[in-house]
Image: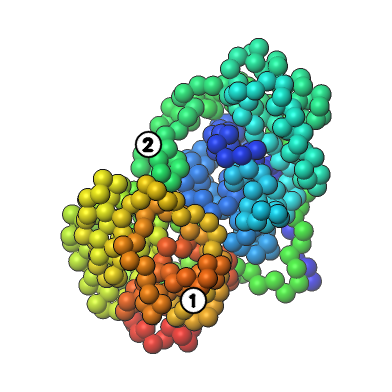
Amino acid sequence: MLKETKLNPTVVVAGVRSGVGKTTIATAIMAALTRRGYQVQPFKAGPDYIDPSYHQIACGTPSRNLDTWLLPHPTVVELFQRAAGKRQISIVEGVMGVFDGHSSLTEDGSTAELAKLLNAPVILVVDAGKVARSVAAEILGFQQFDPDLRIAGVILNGIGSPRHLEFCQPQIEATTGLPVLGYLPRREEFVQPERHLGLIPTVEGTVANLWYDAISKQVEETFDLDRIVKIAETCNPPAPQPEGYVAAYPEQNEPKRARIAIAQDKAFSFYYQDSLDLLESWGAELLPFSPLEDQQLPLGAGGIYIGGGFPEMFASELANNKPMLASIRDAVKRGVPVYGECGGLMYLGKSLSDLDGQQHPMVGVIPAVSAMSDKRLVLGYREVESRIDNPLMTRGQRVRAHEFHWSILEEAPGESESVYRVLDQENRPDGFHAGSVWASYVHIHLGSDPSLARRFVDTCSGPSDMSKLGKI
């Protein structure tokens, strides 16, 4: 039988393009509704790690990624329902422009595809900073581009004055029939600082409560929050799960059988919340540690997971924490499985050159030598095949992933030492494998295949014996 899904009031906040302020506006709506007493569940479309950290502070609960290219569609619905069902209203922040995604000619991986999968209405964010009534033509184009996408309202960013608003709002509503649900004025205090990978993560302590206070108060003054809630209530439940669907989460949490040390601090904070929850549900006890501040790994760890982040911003501190470097080296000598992603690869390598070109020694358990580049951002979805058995996958297994970094390797991995083949880039070797260490530039959502989290837990659950990897 098909598994029925529930109705949860939901609205998607999407932009006409990147840079129109959708993170600020989505977070502001979340914060304002939370202050009104609503239990808000935040979500982020696409493979973003930083924006969800802003959502979490606004709502007091973890934000979750919903990616219609990385994840099977039924899994997207499962993750959505699992989190949304515990809260009163869900706000989903889109990614890039509403129709932008993996493909140039289809909606794959786009905010529009996600909104239609969730059967949720869309509020379109438009930058009106350098335009007046012409903004109505832009909105009309988005409205007509895909009639199946239910755009239910508009929010304007960059309004300069009440007179400016008078030149925008009437024409929008007359031309499109869509209500203007609110606006943000042009003010410097609403702008958040950025650097090479986007907004600065909140884990670094750069986001002041004053910013949340300011945007929340502004939303109360210039947004119709009651109408936004009413629009969210017009959503329809997602389609039922197909017969035979294999859920990502077990029906009941598995007993704890593995202890996994996970790097979590200012240098390493890029983890999908559902990836962590999946590990715990399949029997892992997660042991957070700081490569910056702790002197040794958590006692009893049967595995180590080092995700992405900004090791280049803290390279000197990481290099100077010699006891932690020695602790990880010792764990590797004992055969403890170690899995690193992007920033984790950089940290586990021989050395890392920071933004100033200063070279710092790192753990040194894989032959990677990395440096920051100001010339080329590596960004995009990837489809990878595991060249060898590793803590997540068996040899030959394929999974969808994502890559996002400014750093480059002094020497790319050879086929024999690599972890993955990047199938959509002529089988390019990616990552390094040495002993019990596997590290790669690609980020993998553990919900993309129901076997990944369970295999990771199984790998870390017993005596370190690499020969068992292919038999899990």
Residue in the picture at 65% in, 65% down = 72
Residue 8 versus residue 306: which sits nearer the camera? 306
Tag 1's secondary structure?
Answer: strand
> What's under tag 1, amino acid-wise?
Ser
Res 167 visible:
yes
Q: Which residue is mark 1?
A: 386
- Residue at the disc numbered 2: 206
Tell me which residue sits at (34%, 48%) in the image. Answer: 266
- Please tell me in which quadrant of the rendered image residue 37 appears: top right
> Quick one: 254 or 224, which is closer to the camera?
224
Apparent side of residue 261 relative to residue 253 in the rendered image (left or right): left
The residue positioned 58% from the left and 34% from the top of the image is 20
Q: Which kind of residue does numbered mark 2 sit on?
A: Thr
**Quadrant of the rendered structure where residue 400 is?**
bottom right
43 lies left or right of 318? right
Is residue 118 at all visible to an observer of this figure? no
Residue at 25 percent across and 65 percent down: it is: 350
Q: Between residues 430 and 212, which one lies in front from this camera angle? A: 430
Secondary structure category for the residue under label 2: loop
Residue 80 x, y percent position in the rendering:
64, 55
Viewer-nearest of labels 1 and 2? 1
Quadrant containing the N terminus is bottom right
x and y percentages locating residue 190 in the rendered image: 49, 27
Residue 297 percent location from the top left of the image:
27, 64
Q: Kindly identify which numbered label has been placed on residue 302.
A: none
